[in-house]
Amino acid sequence: MNAESVIFSIFLIFTGAALMAALALYARQSLLVAYIVLGWIAGPWGLGLVRDADLIEGIGHIGIIFLLYLLGLNLHPQKLVRLLREALTVTAASSLVFAMTGFAIAWSFGFRGTECVLIAAAVMFSSTILGLKLLPATALHHRHTGEVIISVLLLQDILAILILLLLETLGPAAPSLTAAVVHLGALPLLVLFAFVLENLLLVRLIRRFDAIGEYVFLTAIGWCLGISQLAHWLGLSYETGAFVAGVALASSPVATHIAESLRPLRDFFLIMFFFSMGAGLAIDALPGVLLPAVVLAAVVLILKPPVFRWLLVREGERRELAAEVGVRLGQGSEFALLIAALALHREVMGERAAYLVQVYTLLTFIASSYVIMWRYPTPIAVNARLRRD
């Protein structure tokens, strides 16, 4: 893609996003849905104004990397241990219920056994993007509701990363047993390296030059992308590296400042991510998966909120809080898309099954964002009374 095409694509995406966002706000609709609709209209399967969907998807991928980096930044290691202990039962039990549900639905529509297992794995997770994007930072993030949501999402993200690691060892091009063991052992090695380097070098540099905001900003980005690239070289995902980078830096006194300064950059790339979701919607393949995708999405949207509510109440949470957390976690996940894409690449999942996961995720994103924005406080709520930063 030449430079003019890149500039035109960026212009089209953000000018179109501004126009679609204005229409969505006037119509009291979700901004996230506006970005997805724009992607479908302007993408290869719509008007074809932006044809290189792979480029847009790659840029959107950076949004997920920054999101996981910010999630790690907000989790001090000591706090991380406490949150993991509190949310372990809820996450384990809910994941089992959702996985069994996804497997049963996929099996009933005739998918292969391996595909059913992978679809079941994709259904287990809720969206970190929607969970954090629609969570008011000042109102909830530092209170118990926000902590519960983040702790469950965190455990789900760790489980998703482990599944991605496992997928890297499967398929016709799977590595040898020795290589697979080395690959899985790369995660503790990466964690150890990140914490050692952060303590010996990074924190000293930040303390010395913390008065220069530009330097702290650049260092934070370089740290995130550097550990992400190292993770990739070790055979792990970029997302894994970003999360490890965030957790390693979370104990720094400037972690909160870094998290706030990176939010606009994260939002920039997340717009690309939602645009890429719409741009990747292949209309010609839709009839083959529409019915199972709608059934799967409907069951998940109906099932997830009461399951989370029941489990949280059993753990001693208030019913009102448990109900809100259940609704906020009641959708599919961007990790489902990553699992489907990697499984397709490793040839352990067919195109129809991978497209089912994509359509299911898209449908739950749209429906869940509407429900959350109409019922609970969010930074982009359609109801002015609920709009909180």
Image (tube, rainbow, N blue to C red):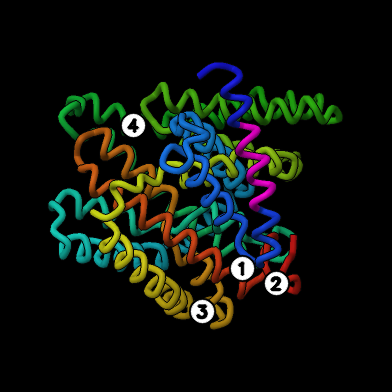
Question: Quick one: label 2 or label 3, which is nearer the N terminus?
Answer: 3
Q: Which residue is mark 2?
A: 383
Callout 4: few (<14), some (14-19), or many (20+) C-alpha neighbours within 10 Å? few
Disc 4 versus disc 3: distance between alpha carbons?
37 Å
Question: Quick one: label 2 or label 1, which is nearer the N terminus?
Answer: 1
Front-lying residue, 9 or 319: 9
Callout 2: few (<14), some (14-19), or many (20+) C-alpha neighbours within 10 Å? some
Where residue 373 is drawn, which disc sits there?
1
Disc 2 versus disc 1: distance between alpha carbons?
7 Å
Question: Quick one: label 4 or label 1, which is nearer the N terminus?
Answer: 4
Circle 2/circle 1 CB separation < 8 Å: yes
Q: Which residue is mark 3?
A: 316
- Type of residue at label 1? Met
The segment highlighted magenta reads 10-20
265 w.r.t. 132: above or below = above
Disc 2 versus disc 3: distance between alpha carbons?
31 Å
Between marks 4 and 2 in the image, the one whose residue lies nearer the viewer: 2
Callout 3: few (<14), some (14-19), or many (20+) C-alpha neighbours within 10 Å? few
Percent coordinates x, y for residue 104 in the rendering: 20, 66
Q: Give the residue at x 63% y 37%.
A: 249
Question: Quick one: label 4 or label 2, which is nearer the N terminus?
Answer: 4
Question: Quick one: label 4 or label 3, which is nearer the N terminus?
Answer: 4
Q: Give the residue at x 13% y 58%.
A: 110
In the figure, is residue 159 to the left or right of 170?
right
Secondary structure at badge 4 equals loop
Q: Which residue is mark 4?
A: 185
In the figure, is residue 312 to the left or right of 212?
left
Callout 1: few (<14), some (14-19), or many (20+) C-alpha neighbours within 10 Å? many
Between marks 3 and 1 in the image, the one whose residue lies nearer the viewer: 1
